[in-house]
Structure formats: structure tokens, C-alpha cells
Image: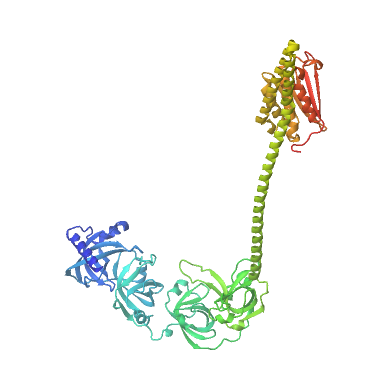
Amino acid sequence: MKTTTTLLAALLCALVARGEAELHSSAESDALSDEEFAKGRLFEITAAVVATYPNGILLLKDEGGFFEAVSDGRQNLAPGQVATLRGRTFCEPSSQVRNLEVKSAEVVGREPIPEPRVMSVGEILRYDGKVDFVKVRGMIADVRVDDIDPEWNYVMLRDGSYQIPLAVVESGSFRGRMAGLVDAEAEVTGAVFPGHAGFRLFIGPFVRTWSESCIKVVVPPPDDPFELPSIGDLRDASPYLIAGMGRRTASGVVLAVWGQGTFLMRDDEGHTMRVELADASSVPKWGARVNVVGYPETDLFRINFTQAKCRVESQAQLLPEAPEDVTPAKILFDENGRKMVKPDYYGRLVRIRGRVCAVPSDGGQGMSIMLDCGGLLVSLDLSANPGIGDGIEAESVVEATGVCVLESQNWRPSMIFPRIDRLFLVPRHAGDLHVLSRRPWLTTGRLLVVLASLFAAFVGILVWAVSLRIVARRTARALYRAEIVNAAAELRLDERTRLAAELHDSVAQNLSGISMQISAARSARHVAPTDEEVHLDVAERMIRSSLSELRRCIWDLRSDALDDPDFAAALESTVRPVAGRSAIHVSCNVKRSRLNDTTAHSLLRVARELTANAVRHGGAANVWIECTSEQGILRMVVRDDGRGFDPDSCAGPGEGHFGLKGIRERARRLDAVFSLESAPGKGTTATIEIKAVGENGG
């Protein structure tokens, strides 16, 4: 890997030597867009070395001003040297910070290190230029290790209400050494940046120094920080003045302790103060008398100390104090139900009652218990005394005594009126919690279990019912298909029986008559030759009649008229093929559903036969078919305007005409009455009446 890096560096130097460098000053690199900068543009820049960082960063200066570059340390550059630097531009993949990566350097001279520009902390906070070499003075307020890059340490430099971070590359012991300089006034030399420190895009202007030697103590810290000036009476002070006071001290008694190093204190003047310790390992206990030193801030109601230190003077307990019985609603709302927080309850000892609606999952060894007090949720913070909640169960009714805390943020310029975020109580000891009633057997959790079990049973029954319904549907479909098959078989059998009856009553009888006529003709051949012709003529007409009957039977098999739900349409479609050019007039008020298939078929055959006779023998121009149902009697009348005939002297089966005989046979099978009225020149009217009309399929 090292061999590959060396070869790449040598190749890059060779390319630059051949005059292929694109950038020759820091100003040219600053002018590149981020997209162009990330492409790895080659540079060759001659600049003076101002400072070198332990991690390879170089602070440089050319005619364009101060700038930084990144080196792998093999160039052995030192402050005061002038060198020609060659390399490429690149952007950090994660943070997109622009860097000049130095691959080679050639020392070409020396020049004095320039004097740094003197700036105040306030001026640096407003700085928006490029990198500059500066000197700044202020008080060391805090020392911290960067939690995202432990190589860097941060020293907080404060001047009144202004504060800036100083980034220093040093070993782990640096923090311990610098912690002893808190409250010292120091002069710092380094490079100022307008912002964007890696992942911290919004850190604002900050100063980066290259060693601990850049931090020069001007005024040492006090031997005892608790001897700093007292906070005093700041009743008329503005939040700007309070935030810029610097560290102050106060003395008082601890009222309540919670969270990670936070406690409430009543000072000797009777003021309630919130103290946030810089080191949570030295938290005092409730009732202790303490001295504190820290930075005063305010939430506009009281003074609060941040980044504080605490020294316990004694463990004297507070004098007995009677708690005030209140409800959360009294603290948070007025008598009309409008939100109106009463800040004077902050730090007072109060007593409330409520139902426990949430406890720590480990059975009371956790940090808080939630009470439901008439619909308002109030937390009991047990973080300083987690054991005092042992044995308290959800759904129990509890009477809790504790110090009332109205939590709010401190003032800052972007939050002129900090809002009160929540109300909670801090019990002091186990005697502050009294269980008034234990939870009933049927708790919310158990009720949910019962409901869940019932729901699961209901779902099981529902699934079983759905499965049973599916099985029943499948069985019903199978039975229905079997019934359809049986019904179809019965229909085929009925149709075959009806067709057999039709053939027996018409064609078979006609064939028997034909056989008889042919036998009679054979017998008359030698006895009465003239009778032979008569018998053969009758036989011929009977054959034609049989042929017509067979065609009608075949038509019945192919016709869909019997399936038509409109009986009037079925009548018209049945008679239309035999009507020729004659006009057909159909009037029917009988529903098809009231006729069984046998009756409907017989009526259609009768109507067709009568229409065929009217057109073929009567020469009718119009045929009227009327079908009515009144008082359980179905009546069908077929009337025409043809030539008419004498019913008493009309040709019959003896002459080979079987139409009227077939109609009468059908009427007899239906237990119906058939009548015929006709006279020469007056047309014909045929009526068939059925006394009982059956429902289809009945």
C-alpha cells in the first residue's frame, strides 16, 4: 500500500513538473465551485508556512491571504519556511469540507512569521471572512473532548455574554491540565474560521490552535473559585446583563434533586435557584447546605446556575414544613379553566392525589411514576431516590408529597419568553409516598387480556363459521349441480315422452291409415279399379300430412320459443314461419310463468296449426290471436278473415286432413274445450279454453 502511494505521489509530481498544474494560488482554489473542487484539480502554490498542526494540517500564507492545507507529515515543513507545494484538491466524502492535499513540497526560502490580527470574542462571533491568523483574549469557561472526534479538544473562551469554541489537537491529559485553568484569563493565538467544522455545519465562527502553547495565561484563576463574587440581588437586572456577568457564587439549602446533576436550592436571600452541575458525580443530597459557583442565567422568573460546581458545607436537614394540598389544575389553570400557570408554586412543598397510570417496567426501581390527577398527568421524578417507589403498582391510588418544579428553558435571544414545559414533583424520601388503595383485580391490563381472549375466541368462532359456510356452499353447489343434472335428465325424458306421444298421435296414426288405404287399393285393383285411385289419392294426402307433422316435430326440437319469458313474443315467433305474407296480430295478457311447459307447448302448436290452416286453406290476409286469463280460465282465440268453410262438411282424416283432429286431441289431453265457428266467406274463429292453469313446473 505504501509503495502504491509513493508511486502515485511520484506520478503526480511528474505531472506537475511538466506544467500541468491548474491552480497556482489560494485565491484560484477559493474561486472554484464545490463541484470543480471535488474533481481533484492539480495545484502548485508557493506559500509561507505559518504553523503546523500535529495531525498534519498546515497554516499557510500566500499573496491571496491565509489558508490551510493537509499534509501526510513526510515533507518536514516548519514555521517560517517558504515552500512550493504540489498536490490536488479534494472534498471529504462525509462532510464535504474542502482541502488542499499536499503530495510534495520543496523549500525555496524563509520569511518571518506574520503578526496575528488582534480580535475580540465578539468580533470573532461576527466574522464572515476567509481563514485568518488571529489573537483573541477571554476567560476560560470550560474544557471538553469532542464526542465525534476524540483527537480534538474544545476550550470555551468567554468574554462577558459572548463565548466561542477553541479547537485544540492534544493528548488525553490536555483536558486535565486545562480544567485547572477554568476562570483564568488567557490570550489565544490561532486560525479563525467563519464556520462549518466538519459535520457541525452550524457551529459558527471558531478558532483552531495547533498546540497548548498557543494558550497563554494572562490572569491565573482564583485559588478558590468559591471566593468569586456573590450573585447578590439582581432583581432589576436584564437577561443580557445576567448572561454576561461571568461566574458567580451563591449559598443555600438543597430543596430537591433530580436528573443528571440538577438540583433546586433556596439561597440565603430566600430565592429559589436551579443548579446544573458540570460534573454529575458530586451531586448533594436533599437538605444539605451548599455553596455553588457557576454561570448565572435566567428563565425570567429566577436565577439559574449552569456549568456549576458544588461544595457541601453541612448535611443539616430542613426544618419541618407542612405541605399544601393542591391539584395540578389549581397550579396550571384559573377558575374558568383557562391556562394560567402560577410560578409562585415553583419550589414549594405540595401534596397531590392521583391514580398511578404508569410505573417503570422493572417494578418501581426506575426513574419516574406517572399520576393521573383528574385528567392531568403529573410525573413523580425519582431519579435521585429510585428506591422510594418500591411496591407501587399501576392503577393504585397514591398521595404524593414533593417539591413542585415548573420546568422551563433559560432565556436566550431567540427565546425572549421561555415557556414552561411541564410540571412535576420531586419526592424527598419514602415517607412522601402513601398508597391509599391498591389496584383492583380487574385492572386495565387484565381487562385488556380478557378482551383480547374474547376477541381471539370470537375470531376463532368467526373463522370456524366462515369455514363451515364455505363447506356448506361447496356442498350446496354440488347438490345443485346434481339436481340440475337430474332435472336435465327428467326434461330430456319428458321431451322424449312428449315427442313419442306426438309421433304416436299423429305420424303413427297417419302411417296406420296410409297402410290401410294402400291395402284397400290393392284389394280394389281387380274388383273396382276406380276405387283404387281414390284410395291411393287418400294415401298420398296422408303421406303429405305425415311429412308436415314430422317437420313440425323437428321444428319443435329446434325452436327456442318455449324458453321465451314473454308468451306473446313466443306466439308470434311460432306462427310467423307459416304465415307467409299474411299479417299476424297477437294480443296476450298471460304470463309465461303461469303456464307449465306442456300447456305452453300445446297452445303454441294449436296456434301454429290454426294459422297455417287460415293461410293455406282460407287465404286469410290477417290472423288475430288473443290469449287471456280470467277467473282461472285461460282462453286462446284464433280468428282470421279468410274464405271460411262449413265445419260440418269439411274434409277430415278420411280425405287425408288431420289438422283439426290433432287440435281436438291436444285439447282433450289438456282437459280443455275446443270450439270452431266458420262459414263460407265469413272467416273462421277457433277457441280453446283451459279450466285450470298451472304454474310453470307445477
Q: Is residue 614 visible?
A: no
User: Observer-nearest residue: 220 or 560?
Assistant: 560
Residue sitting at x 73%, y 28%: 504
User: Observer-nearest residue: 316 or 173?
Assistant: 173
Q: Is residue 27 visible?
A: yes
Image vertical order of residue 271 relative to residue 198, above or below:
below
Query: What quarter of the picture does the N terminus occupy?
Result: bottom left
Residue sitting at x 68%, y 33%: 563
Q: Quadrant of residue 206?
A: bottom left
Residue 492: image location, x then y, percent: 68, 36
The type of colouring in the image is rainbow
Name the side, left or right, on which 423 lies relative to 693. Answer: left
Q: Quadrant of residue 343?
A: bottom right
Residue 625: image location, x then y, percent: 74, 24
Image vertical order of residue 558 relative to residue 456, above or below:
above
Residue 606: image location, x then y, percent: 74, 25
Residue farthest to the front? Answer: 526
Residue 670: image location, x then y, percent: 79, 31
User: Observer-nearest residue: 139 or 314?
Assistant: 314
Name the side, left or right, on which 21 lies relative to 355. Answer: left
Residue sitting at x 48%, y 70%: 411
Query: What quarter of the picture does the C terminus occupy?
Result: top right
Image vertical order of residue 592 relative to residue 108, above or below:
above
